[in-house]
Amino acid sequence: MTNNTRSIGKLVVLKIGDGCFDQGFPVILQIWEEGKSPLLEITGRLPPAPEILQSCQNWTTSYHSLGLRSRLEASVVQVTNVSKLERCYNAAQVLGDRLNAWLSSEPFRPIKEKLLEQLLPSDEIRLIIQTENSCLRRLPWHLWDFWERYSKAEIALSALKFEPVTPNTKPHQNVRILAIIGNSFGIDTEADQKLLEQLPDAQIKFLIEPKRQQVNEALWEQSWDILFFAGHSSSKNDGCTGNIYINKTDSLTINQLKFGLKRAIEKGLKIAIFNSCDGLGLASNLANLQIPQIIV
């Protein structure tokens, strides 16, 4: 017998409202079928869990103690202290276990049960976690054991508040991509270039280890559909600020590119892709600019 079961695209949105780990967070669950009206919306709550915040801080401290805060540093630093590696691994394990216990708590159970009721293992699922809390954004949501039964699920982060910008230009016939290849010491960015060059119906401009002025001029003078960056990046401990290393000597914050990026958004920029490590700070800065889609 032929199995004609077709996977269905589902959009799952978890809106985590204002709160804190000492008092808990209100949660709204929305489930949509792609291209249709919402299937449902229910409310729940994540209970107080100060141990989650402490575990996240412990893991962050352990990771930073390895000296691998960015791919740039990871390529030249060798970790020889086994005890540091073990502490980092154990801290990550504790954080994952506590996160799963939190997401299995009684106040959150109605949301979890509704997910089980509405989602099939064959569904293609996009889970978007919407929150303004930087600590919640730093949690390893991919370790939620609930998703082990859903092999086609992907997880993304989003701000709760978003005001779309209406482009003042007409759509391009071909997709226009501005590809910035930054400091690539120790990593293979040639693979990124080759993949981009193989894209059909795409017009691509490469900036290889550019100066800041070159990046700004490209954002201001032309219109783009996609901004792509490959190279090294890093985020500050608060997860709210990030840097990209555009060449061997210079780095930029998103704030330093703010006006050029706003101009690009007004001209129709639809998506920003950063193929770099430790990009949470970049995502936070980019979200403030109201770029429609961000991948880091």
Image (spheres, rainbow, N blue to C red):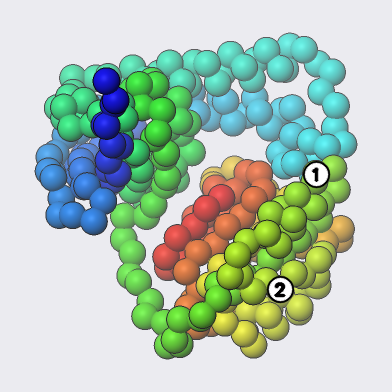
Q: Which amino acid does label 1 sit on?
A: Ile
Residue 251 in the image: x percent, y percent?
75, 61
In front: mark 2 or mark 1?
A: 2
* Direction from residue 81 to residue 132 in the image, left or right: left
Q: Which of marks 2 and 1 is nearer the N terminus?
A: 1
User: What is the crowding at mark 2: few (fewer than 14 residues within 10 Å), some, or many (at least 20)?
Assistant: few
Q: Which residue is drawn at 57% across and 25% down?
A: 59
* Direction from residue 66 to residue 110 in the image, left or right: left
Q: Is mark 1 on a helix, strand or loop?
A: loop
Q: Residue 205: which numbered mark, if any? A: 2
User: Residue lying farthest front?
Assistant: 1
Measured in 3D between alpha carbons, the distance from the residue under mark 2 to the one under mark 1, in whole angstroms, is 21 Å
Q: Residue at x 62, y 17 (%)?
A: 89
Q: Is residue 241 among what the camera can see?
A: no
Q: Which residue is drawn at 58% across and 13% down?
A: 90
Q: Is residue 98 among what the camera can see?
A: yes
Report which residue position mark 1 lands on. 187
Give whichever of 230, 204 is nearer the camera: 204
Residue 115, located in which quarter of the rendered image?
Answer: top left
Residue 78 in the image: x percent, y percent?
85, 26
Residue 132 in the image: x percent, y percent?
37, 51
